[in-house]
Amino acid sequence: MKKMGIKRKIGIIMIIMVIIIPILFISYYYLSGSQGKLQLDITNISPTAINNNTSIEMNIEFELKNIGDTWIRIAPFPSELDIWFFFPNGSGPESLPCTIQISQLCDNSAGAPVYHNSDLIYLAPDAKITFHYKQIHVFTITGTYKLVGHYDSEDYADGITIPFWEGDVESNEVFFKVK
């Protein structure tokens, strides 16, 4: 068997590097971004005391934060955010909240949105997105209401071809009173 010359060995190594490095880069790009941890918090709500049968503008601030140690890609926020209003004691089962889907508050005449790779949001570790919800509500039942945010990224992923964070996360519970 013939010995390979040094130039031939270097040539083979270069060819392997030219092939393997782009494959590793592409693999990293497509496989990263789907792992990570998200935290959803309600950071502010006003007013916290409301008179019943009165039109009132609810102001709620949500914060979605990457609490992991890697970059992640997420579906558009807040369009995948639901706000759950749980009725006061005895007036409705806690398992059946009144749900407000943020995507339904937008112009949704074309049906459910189809997202694409360009719609994904990149979140660095410790980065956050804040969303301010403002809507007029009339509460007719007195008592203490519980409010919970729920972010679910699995619904409209048909047009996305690269990995992104899929799952759901619930916020902390916040309470407000209707007198």
Image (cartoon, rainbow, N blue to C red):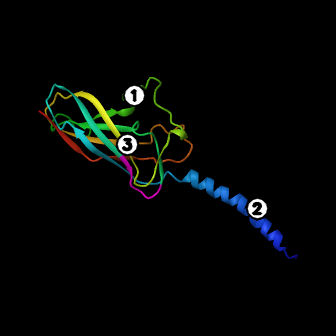
Q: Tell whether position 66 is magenta.
A: yes
Badge 1 local density, few (<14 within 10 Å), some, or many (20+)?
few
User: In the orientation shown, which residue stands out farthest toward the top?
Assistant: 109
The three-letter amino acid code for the residue at tag 2 is Ile
Image: 72 above or below 146:
below
Residue with the mark numbered 3: 151
Residue with the mark numbered 1: 106
Q: Is residue 94 visible?
A: no
Residue with the mark numbered 2: 15
**Cα distance, mark 2 to mark 3?**
46 Å
**Cα distance, mark 2 to mark 1?**
52 Å
Badge 3 local density, few (<14 within 10 Å), some, or many (20+)?
many
The three-letter amino acid code for the residue at tag 3 is Tyr
Mark 3 residue element: strand
Name the image quarter holding residue 55: top left
Report the span colored magenta: 64-70
Mark 3 or mark 2, which is nearer the start of the sequence? 2
Residue 141 % position (x, y): 15, 30
| In the foreground, 139 or 135 | 135
**Cα distance, mark 3 to mark 1?**
16 Å
The three-letter amino acid code for the residue at tag 1 is Cys
Mark 2 residue element: helix
* Disc 3 + disc 1, Cβ < 8 Å: no
Image: 148 above or below 136:
below
Residue 12 % position (x, y): 78, 66
Q: Residue at x 17, y 25 (%)?
A: 54
Q: Is residue 7 left or right of residue 133?
A: right
Q: Quadrant of the C terminus?
A: top left
Mark 1 or mark 2, which is nearer the start of the sequence? 2
Mark 1 or mark 3, which is nearer the start of the sequence? 1
Disc number lying in front (3 or 1)? 1
